[in-house]
Image (cartoon, helix red, strand yellow):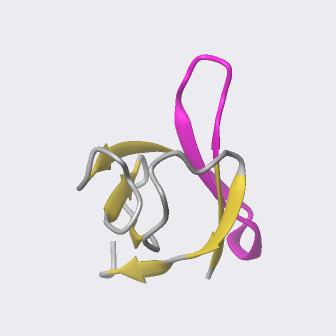
Amino acid sequence: MKVMIRKNRDGVLSAYVAKKDLEEPIVAMERAAMWGGRVTLANGWQLELPALAAETALPITVEARRIGDA
């Protein structure tokens, strides 16, 4: 699914899924650089993000995979 990752002016990362009209803060990351790992959203969803460079500019839309039934 297409997911837009962005950072607000307070430095909080969030994910927006247009098809679900869902925007949730990212509350946990498997890897410090976020890319190429699993992130957890405030609503419990877990997404597998593609491997990108740590310095990738935000906002960016990526193809992510939802993991589990949460």
Task: Indicate yes or no whether the magenta region holds residue 7.
Answer: yes
Provide residue 38's location: percent of width, then percent of height. 31, 65
State the quadrant of the N terminus. bottom right
Which residue ends up furthest to the top in the rendered image?
10
Q: Is residue 63 above or below residue 17?
A: below
Provide residue 6's location: percent of width, then percent of height. 65, 44
State the quadrant of the C terminus. bottom left
Q: Is residue 55 above or below residue 43?
A: above
Q: Is residue 67 above or below residue 47?
A: below
Provide residue 37's location: percent of width, then percent of height. 31, 66
Residue sitting at x 28%, y 44%? 32
Q: Nearer the viewer, residue 35 or 64?
A: 35
Task: Indicate yes or no whether the magenta region holds residue 21.
Answer: yes
Residue sitting at x 66%, y 28%? 8
Over which residues does the magenta segment extend? Answer: 6-23
Q: Nearer the viewer, residue 20 or 17?
A: 17
Tell whether 27 sits left or right of 24: left
Residue sitting at x 43%, y 71%? 51
